[in-house]
Each structure stands twice: as C-alpha cells, then as structure tokens.
Image: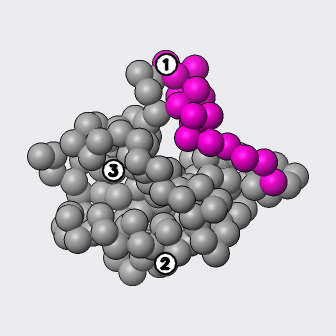
C-alpha cells in the first residue's frame, strides 16, 4: 500500500453547462499521452462518484506529487462563458465531502489540497498566493473547506 500524504482536488476544467463523462476524461488523458485517466475518483454533476485508478496505482494528475497523492476530480470548473468558477452542484459538494471523508478515514495523515495549492510559492512566504497559482483549478478554497 502506498503512503498517501495528499488528497488533491481537481476540476475537469470543462463548462458546467455541458456533460463531461469519465470516458471523456479517459479520452482526454490518453490524448495527452497518459496510459489511462489520471485521477483516482471522478465526481459527476449528479453526485455520482466514479472510481478511476486503483488507490494503490500512482496517478497522473499533479506533477511532482503523484507518488504520494490521490487525485479526486469533479466535473466542471468553468462557467457557461468558459471562465474559471466554482460550478459544483449541491449533489457534487455532498458527494465530494463524503468521498474525502472516507479517504481521510483510510489515510488519516493525508492533507486535502486543491491542485492550485501545489503551485510554487515564489515569494517564499509559506502561502501560495493567488498571483502565484499556475492554474485556478479547482476554483474554491479547498484547504479552508476541508479544515486541514
């Protein structure tokens, strides 16, 4: 069993007014050269949680952190105009919290972070400030929401 230190929350960076299935994630990741989908779990707008990679399989979702993390992605993350936004539905939020709670029971030492929180701290103040983020994914304050 791998040592899991991080649970990394992602968004699919797709428009909330369009469906993006787990199969679509797999196709997009294979197009980028991955062997299969890079996440361990995918949370649809309906709240359905779709398992992807086995937890003991290293993911392909957060360069430099894959060997010590699990990747959880939710469908959406862009508004109807294609701009980054917290597009989670109430069902997605509930499912995401339930899933992360279950993962934390299995990996109690893990911290929950957003993909954007793994950007380099270029001013070395111990915080990834908004202007240091390489991407906005997942468009909400994961660390605050999950009380690390």
Tags 3 and 1 touching, CB below 8 Å: no
* Residue under numbered circle 3: 70
Q: Is residue 139 left or right of residue 114?
A: right
Quick one: label 3 or label 2, which is nearer the N terminus?
Answer: 3
Identity of the residue drawn at 25% across and 64% down: 110
Please determine whether, in this image, residue 144 is positioned above or below residue 15: below
Residue 133, position in %: x, y? 56, 53
Tags 3 and 2 touching, CB below 8 Å: no
* Residue under numbered circle 1: 33
Q: Residue 108 lies in what quarter of the image?
A: bottom left
Q: Which residues are magenta?
A: 17-33
Q: Residue 79 lies in what quarter of the image?
A: bottom right
Tags 2 and 1 touching, CB below 8 Å: no
Distance from the alpha carbon under mark 3 to that under mark 1: 19 Å
Q: Secondary structure at mark 3?
A: strand
Whether residue 127 is in magenta: the answer is no
Quick one: label 3 or label 1, which is nearer the N terminus?
Answer: 1
Please determine whether, in this image, residue 79 is positioned above or below residue 95: above
Quick one: label 2 or label 1, which is nearer the N terminus?
Answer: 1
Q: Secondary structure at mark 2?
A: helix
Identity of the residue drawn at 72% across and 47% down: 19
Identity of the residue drawn at 67% across and 69% down: 89
Residue 70, position in %: x, y? 33, 50
Residue 132 in sight from this viewpoint: no
Question: Which of 52 and 127 lies nearest the eye of the viewer?
Answer: 52
Question: Which of 88 and 5 lies nearest the eye of the viewer?
Answer: 88
Whether residue 27 is in magenta: the answer is yes
* Residue under numbered circle 2: 145
Question: Which of 67 and 87 lies nearest the eye of the viewer?
Answer: 87
Distance from the alpha carbon under mark 2 to that under mark 1: 33 Å
């Amino acid at each position: 069993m791998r040592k899991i230190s991080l649970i990394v929350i992602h968004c699919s960076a797709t428009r909330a007014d369009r469906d993006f299935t787990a199969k679509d994630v797999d196709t997009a990741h294979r197009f980028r050269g991955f062997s299969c989908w890079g996440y361990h779990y995918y949370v649809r707008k309906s709240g359905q949680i779709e398992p992807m990679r086995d937890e003991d399989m290293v993911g392909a979702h957060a360069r430099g952190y894959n060997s010590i993390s699990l990747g959880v992605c939710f469908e959406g993350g862009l508004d109807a105009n294609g701009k980054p936004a917290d597009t989670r539905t109430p069902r997605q939020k509930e499912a995401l919290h339930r899933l992360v709670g279950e993962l934390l029971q299995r990996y109690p030492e893990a911290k929950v972070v957003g993909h954007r929180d793994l950007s380099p701290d270029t001013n070395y103040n111990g915080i990834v400030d908004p202007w240091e983020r390489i991407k906005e994914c997942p468009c909400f304050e994961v660390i605050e929401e999950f009380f690390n």
